[in-house]
Structure formats: structure tokens, C-alpha cells
Amino acid sequence: MQKYKITISYDGTNYAGWQVQNNKVAIQPLIQKAIETILRHPIQLTGSGRTDAGVHALGQVAHFETPLIIEPRKLRFSLNALLPQDIRIIEVEPASLEFHARYSATSKIYHYHVHLDPTLNPFDRLYKYHFLKACDLNLLLDAIPHFLGTNDFTSFTNQPNKGSASRDPVRTLFRLDCIQAPGGIRLEFEADGFLYKMVRNITGALLDIASKKIQGSEIPSIFAAKDRKKAKTCAPPHGLFLIQVNYKTSSNDS
């Protein structure tokens, strides 16, 4: 058997997310079906993690196995010919059998785009959250250190009793940067992993702080409570992008 790593970009607007959904169109099954059509045998496509409905990706990573020897550039071309135009295969490359798109990852990078000016360019409406409340960005910046480091993020994940959150809600947030962007800001997150809706919930809390709905000094007690109800705001999905999945070594050496 040979394992292949694929890097994928997609506009999540029209999809129910990455993972297979009952009676809804998701991204992973579309790509898996396209690979099976080309290879003419069943495969299992495994992603680095799921993205939710409406969330976008520039660098999602997945892997699959096949007994066939594949020409990566030819497979990429064929897949892009079969897939909808809002899903693109950026790269196909051989990987060692030990490589796993999810478990071999050392960190992931997400960006969340917030537009703060009164008017949003209509061409950005599907990719930026238009936040219309008055914001004090200094309050937001002052609150960021509360989120950094290793913490139990139960208060910042939906469905804390399911999936990975139920097994281990502790994650290490290496970096959270607020970058000025035209008309607003870009929040950049890098962590060893993310819980369900964790980025959107942290973003919601930061915007609540910036708009003086809550105080930054409340964040430690919200963490300690381990209660999602303590920080209710969840930013909408369309401003969120999975930018990159990082691995310790190249996929061939994993």
C-alpha cells in the first residue's frame, strides 16, 4: 500500500462542513468520491480535522491509501477537473505509511476576519464578519494574554461532553495575534489543536470585551468555571479560515 497526502483549499459557503453529514453536502465525501472515481476502488479519506458549515480553508490536509502507484500531478489535475470549482486540490504528494493527517500534526493555524467599518464591500460579505458595535481594540489586546498557554478550554467549546473535548479539553494556544487589516482586524490563532467551535467562541469573547459587554478580567474565572454558558457569544462561521496544518517533518519522513 502507498499513502498519499493531499492539501486542499475550499470556500465553505455552500457546504455543511468537512465531515460527512446526513442529507447534506459536505466536502470530504465529495473529494473521496472523486478519488474513487479516478482510482476505481474504494478509499478512506482522513482529514486533519473537521471544519464546520460555512468555514473556509486554504490549507486543509488529508490522506488516503491505495495499492496503486500514482502520478501526483496527474491525480491533482484529474481531481480538480471533477470537483466543484469552490474546492481545489493544491498538492498531492507521497507520504510514509506512518503519516496521519490528524495525529501527525503538531499545530494548526486559523485566521478570523472581522470588518469594523460601517460599510462592508459586498465581495467580502462571505469571508468577513461585519461587526457593527463600537469597539475598543485596546481592551481586546489587553485580554489576549488570558487565552495564551495551556488551558482547559471547556468554557470555549460547544458540546464539551462529546468527541475530543470529552476526552481531553486541554489545549495549548501558542499564538493569538490581532493584525490590522483594511477596514478591520484579523485574529490569528496557532495551537496544538482546537476544540469544536473554539476559535469562534474565543473570537466572540474578545469582541464582547472590545464592545464592553464583558470585562477582560472575567476571562480567568470563565476558564475556571468550565461552563460554556459563562461566555455565550459565538462568532459566525464565514469569517473563519483554516490556513495551515503544521507537521514536525515532511510527510515522507513522518
Image (cartoon, rainbow, N blue to C red):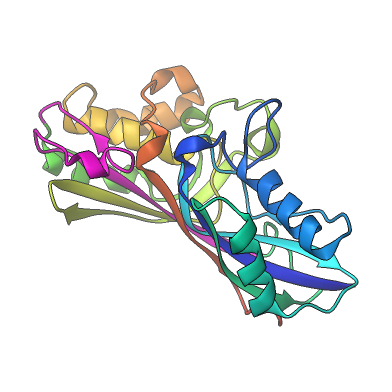
| Left or right side of 14 for 76 | right
Which of the 4 image quadrants contains residue 246?
bottom right
Residue 250 colored in magenta in the image: no
What residue is shown at x 51% (from left), y 26% (from top)? 226
Quadrant position of the N terminus in the picture: bottom right
Residue 72, percent from left and from top: 68, 77
Q: Is residue 68 above or below residue 42?
A: below
Q: Which residues are magenta?
A: 105-134
What residue is shown at x 57% (from left), y 33% (from top)? 16
Residue 87, percent from left and from top: 53, 53
Residue 118 colored in magenta in the image: yes
Residue 84, percent from left and from top: 56, 50
Which of the 4 image quadrants contains residue 239?
top left
Q: Is residue 122 above or below residue 182?
A: above
What residue is shown at x 28% (from left), y 41% (from top)? 128
Can you name the residue that lies furthest to the top here?
A: 229
